[in-house]
Amino acid sequence: MIYKFGEFAVDTLRAEVHLAGTVVPLRRQSFDVLVHLLERPHRIVSKDELLDAVWGDKVVTDGALKHCLMEIRAALGDCDRKIVRTVARRGYILEAPVTKESVAADHRVSVLVVPIDDEGADVNGDYIADGLTEEIITELSKVRSIRVIARASAMRLKDAGDAVQGIAKKLGVDFILDGSARKWGDKLRVTLQLSRLGSDAARWSEHYDGTLGDLFEIQDEIARSVARELAVRLGTPESTKDDELENPRAIESYLRARYETLKFSRDGLQQAERHLLNGLDLVGPNARLLSALGHAYAKYSELGLDPTGAFIGKAAECAVKIFELDPNSSRGFMLLGMVRFYSGALRAAREPLERSLGANPTNPDTLAMLGYLYALSGQNEGAAQLFDEVLDIDPLTPLNHCMPGFVAIMEGRYADALPHYKRFLELDPQNPFAIWTWNYVLLRNGRVDEASNVVRKLNTEHTGSALAQLGTALFHGVRGEAETAREAVTDELCAAARNTELLSRELTHCLALAGETEEALNWLENTVRIGNVNYPFWSRHNEWVDSIRGNSRFDAIMRDVEREWMSVTSIS
């Protein structure tokens, strides 16, 4: 993000202040204070808020903050304190008019971490190399001035061999980090090299020897070394005692669990739970292990494997335990946001996700969830920006390509949505959601004949699924075949939709198209309850609810939606 005021531009990704194209020196803590004020222009920010935002749990004196403000004013030439004004006994306020714009990907140094090769003797030892790859990506992603290709995209290049260079070029990266890991017993050797794209010569190479217990220390040192080579400042890794993990057996449990979780299967999730519970038995409550366990439980909901909500309840318990260890845990906020998101409490999910994103601004899962929430609340510009960031760092994950299309649909730009959903289907042609969304966008564009083939494919390949039923109901509803559309809305589909915004929203459409006014209004109320308050979408851009528009109950719902939409968009 770039904030502009007066003649200044503040680039949060490069952590730089520019004046007429020249970088103005500013220490990182002073820079972070400035950014916090820029994010809240024309609002009094208390001393305690600034201390908490910049220094967190570290004990510092008021003098540290005053010194930062002195440096900021000196850098801005604000000797009369008109830009950053002190409000006696209340705090500080940035008075200048501020505009902001997103940063293009090519303005950042970009790195692709190629999946590390496993050279250990264990035939099932990929979990070490894959885990190390993920952890290095996570640490490097914390550096605002580095664009790091996300784990989901990076892991698609496993065993890609010579094709990596060509793919990296298409991804627009500057550097490739690759290497190998070898484990024998508890001993570990990691060998890595950093090369500029298209060059055979390594810009930096190093090997690290230690034990499995040193794994996280090794990954931190790797991230710092890479950052130094790229002339980027990487702060000291922030971890609490409850987040540290040094027991080799617990680390192995953690890595094996992450490996199993990412198989996206019921068996994999069960194996992950077993490993993580073993790790917790070894070391007691630990934020890293509890976070991984909570994510594994949340995956049941994400994959549609939690019809009773039992597993999302277990995930919520993990979040509670994390906050007992650290009330300000970014891992805890991310997990809490996921729990609320998959429980259908979308409004409540927003605040913890925003807090988590503040600590880790390049987490693709957080970016995608927040983008979805912003789109549902009518903050379309903010949603589009987050979706662009997701595509920038995670371009090989098929689902990410349809996200800008969702914003286009919320704005009634159905033709603009077509290429996004088409790309999603091209990248993942067997995915039932990809098939369903392509059917959906074809129907939105009136291409009913093409949609008939797609809905037939959906019913053939995914018979009886909620998406097949929903696709069928929409198809017949758009064609004006009300009775057939109504028959496709089964009790099973309605039960699945109760706490799911997407299914609830589309049942509103199906039943409105079928002429079932009261049922459609019931589902509209449910959709609004969950969190879809995009007033322009419902009131202007959505012709599929024309049959219930003007109904007194519809008008009452819209009055509530408009009030909430205005309250959200007025502070964004």
Image (tube, rainbow, N blue to C red):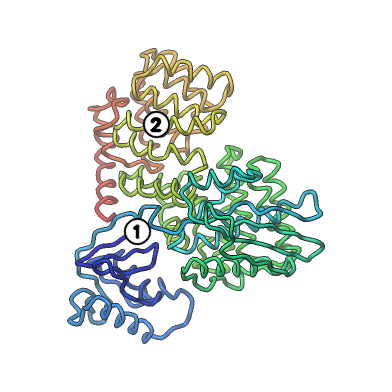
* Residue 558 at x, y percent in the picture: 26, 37
- Number of numbered discs present? 2
Q: Secondary structure at mark 1?
A: loop
Q: Percent x, y for residue 466?
A: 53, 28
Rendered image: mark on residue 1: 1
Sequence-first tag of 1 and 2: 1
**Where on the picture, by quarter, is residue 485?**
top left
Residue at left 49%, top 19%? 455
Which is nearer the eye, 360 or 8? 8
Q: Amino acid at mark 2?
A: Pro
Hey, which residue is sitting farthest front in the picture? 200
How crowded is the residue under tag 1: few (<14 C-alpha within 10 Å), some, or many (20+)?
A: some
**Residue 419: image tag:** 2
Q: Is 111 or 73 nearer to us in this picture?
A: 111
Position of 321 with respect to 366 (left or right) is right
Q: Secondary structure at mark 2?
A: helix
State which quadrant residue 182 falls in.
bottom right
Mark 2 closeness class: few <14, some 14–19, many ≥20 residues within 10 Å: some
As displayed, is residue 167 above or below residue 199?
above
Identity of the amino acid at label 1? Met
Q: Position of residue 176 (x, y in %)?
A: 55, 55
Quick one: quadrant of the N terminus? bottom left
